[in-house]
Image (tube, grey):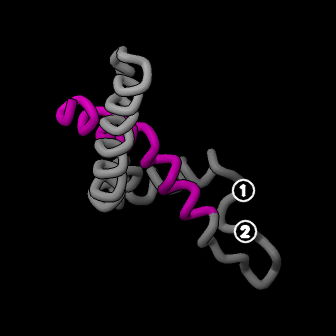
Amino acid sequence: MFCATLCSSFCANIVANPFDVVKSRMQNMTISADGKAMYSGMADCFVKSVKAEGPTVLYAGFTPAFIKLAPYTVISLTLADKLTKAVTGKDAL
C-alpha cells in the first residue's frame, strides 16, 4: 500500500507539475509600461518557456512538490482504505 501510494503521488506530480509551472509564471508575469503582458495565455507561456529554457523548465520545483504531496497521499489513501474496511468490511482500494 505504501509503495502504491508513493507511485501514485509521483505520477500525479509528473502530470501536474508543468501546469503548476505555467500557472506560477502567469501569476508572476509583469505588465510593461505600455500595457503589454509578457504572455498572451497559458499556451504562449508554455511555448515561450520551453523555447527559452528547454523542456526541463516544466519540472522546476518537482522535488518540493513531491515532498509536499507524498505524505498527504500516503496518509489519505491509507486512511481511506482502513476506514472503509472498518465500516463496510471491504477494502476500499
Secondary element at tag 2: loop
Give the magenta range. Answer: 1-26
Return the x and y of residue 52 as percentages of the image width and height: 44, 59
Residue closest to the eye, 46 or 4: 4
Indicate whether 30 appears above or below 51: below
Residue closest to the eye, 15 or 93: 93
Return the x and y of residue 49 as percentages of the image width and height: 49, 56
* Circle number at residue 37: 2
Can you name the residue that lies furthest to the left here? 3
Left or right of 48? Residue 33 is right
**Residue pictured at 28% horizontal, 35% vertical:** 5
Residue that mark 1 sits on: 40
Position of the C terminus, as image quadrant, is top left
Amino acid residing under circle 1:
Ser
Amino acid residing under circle 2:
Ala
Is 11 covered by the magenta stretch?
yes
Secondary element at tag 1: loop
* Main SS class of the magenta portion in the image: helix
Left or right of 42? Residue 79 is left
Is 84 covered by the magenta stretch?
no
Picture quadrant where residue 80 is located: top left
Position of the N terminus, as image quadrant, is top left
How far separated are the C-alphas under marks 1 and 2?
A: 7 Å
**Residue pictured at 63% horizontal, 67% vertical:** 27
Check contact, mark 1 vs mark 2: CB within 8 A. yes
Can you name the residue that lies furthest to the right here? 35
Return the x and y of residue 63 as percentages of the image width and height: 27, 57
